[in-house]
Structures are given as C-alpha cells and as structure tokens.
Amino acid sequence: MVNSAVNEALSRESVWFEKFRYEDAERQFHEILAKGSTGPASCSVVAEIMKARDQIKNSLAAVEDLPSSGSAIPSNVTNRLQQLEQENKDLKKVTDDLRSLVLSLESRVKSLESSKPGSVVQASKPTAPLPTKAPAKADDDDDDDVDLFGSDEEDEDAERIKQERVAAYAAKKSTKPALIAKSNIILDVKPWDDETDMAEMERRVREITSDGLLWGTSKLVPLAYGIKKLQISTVVEDDKVSVDWLTETIQEIEDLVQSVDIAAFNKI
C-alpha cells in the first residue's frame, strides 16, 4: 500500500521530467547577460525560475503529505527524496543568485541610461566658429606698380648673370683633378723547386717598372717539401698598367719563376 502511494506521488512530481525548462531558463539568462539587455526577456527568465521553484515545492509537499505507515520506506526512495531536497536547496541558491544578478544589471542599465542624455547634449553642443583671418590687402596697388616696359632689360640682366655663373662653374670643374682609378694586387710567385734563389727572384721581379706601377712589401710563404713562394704586393693605375701584362712579364723570368697567381685584387 505504501509503495503504491509513494510511486503515485513520484509519478506526479515533475522535477526530473521538466529539467530542460530549468536549463533553458538558465541558458536564456546567460544570453541576456552576454547581450547586456534587461528588457522583457529578463522578466520571462525570472518567471520561469519562480515557476520551477513552485513546482518543486508542490512535488515535495505531495511526498510529505503521504499517509504514514508502520512499514519502512525503501532506501532508494529515501535517497531520492534526499537528493530532491538537496537539489531544491541548490536550485534555490542559484535562483537567488540569478535574481541578484538581474537586479544589479537592471540598476546598472538604468544608471547608464540616466547618464546618456547629458553626454548626448554635450556632444551635440555646437562648436564655436573658428575666427577667420582678416582679408588680405587688395592687390590693386600691385597692379599699379607693374612696369610693362622694363621687362626686357631685367631678362637681359638675368641671362647675363646665368651665363657668368655657368662659365665660372665650368672653369672650376676643369681645374679639379680627375679621379685616378687604382688597384691593390697581391701576387703569388712560385719557384721551380727548393733550390731556387728567392732573393734573386724578388730582385728581378722588382726590376719590372712602368708608369703607374708601384711595388710594395713582400714575404716568403711556405708551400710544401721545403718550397716557399714569393708573395708580393703592388699598386697599379688601372688606365696605365694591365694585370695580364704584369703577370706575363713576371712569367718571362723562366729560369726562376714557374707560375704567377693573383692572391688578392682590391679597388682603391
């Protein structure tokens, strides 16, 4: 008898069957918070929450009004009732929090709406016109000073001054020394073997002279098996001395020189 009464009461309660309403109401509330609106939609959310609370209260009251009996209530029913009570408390807390948030949001929107008219009026206040400059003096006096008959003489003087300046610039440019292109070259002069007289090789290389050729420092650099090469630097004027001519002239010293290589070539 008790089991049938409990089952009948549980069949009438709508907490679990209408859980989607509570989830929809909560989702609508969060959407309203995201959009920043507190219009009729927020009122409908509060109404849905209040309706859900009333339904929970009615279902719990129907369970509590069941006739008492000496037989024990099943443990699963007791556990379910306890869960319902706990969910009711949690839902009450959530609804209270939602209500406080809605009220605070309404007050905030009202404060913002009350502050808007002043800013609009301030923005719509016309700005004072900028002071305009005084009109420039009429150009009638300038027209009176125009000399229609003296323009030819002024043109002749200007042309003469221009010709004098061009002639002075040409004379200055002609006296300026022309830039001479030079190159710094380092040559590697290799002997035939380790018995070659390197001092004699350097002396005969330096005997090569030409206009625009200037010999620099030299040193002996080891190659292999006791053989050393002569590394000598020179500065040449590009227009007067050809690099090919210089290397061929050094290679003409056939009894001492095996080959000539260009180790470095830099423009100065």
Image (tube, rainbow, N blue to C red):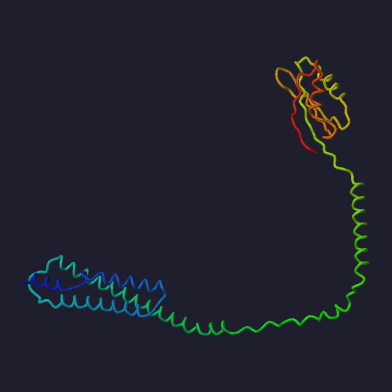
Which quarter of the figure has residue 183? top right
| Residue at figure coordinates x 25%, y 73% from the top left | 88
Left or right: 19 in relation to 71: right
Q: Percent x, y for residue 210?
A: 88, 28
Q: Picture coordinates of residue 109 (x, y %)?
A: 44, 80
**55 vs 217: above or below:** below
Quadrant of res 250: top right
Q: Nearer the viewer, residue 229 or 214?
A: 214
Give the residue drawn at x 90%, y 65%: 155
- State the quadrant of the N terminus: bottom left
Q: Nearer the viewer, residue 224 or 3?
A: 224
- Residue 230 location, x and y as percent? 78, 24
Question: What x and y, as percent, mark residue 148?
Answer: 89, 73
Is 78 placed left or right of 34 in the picture? left
Look at the image and tell me in which quarter the C terminus lies.
top right
Q: Is residue 18 left or right of residue 141?
A: left
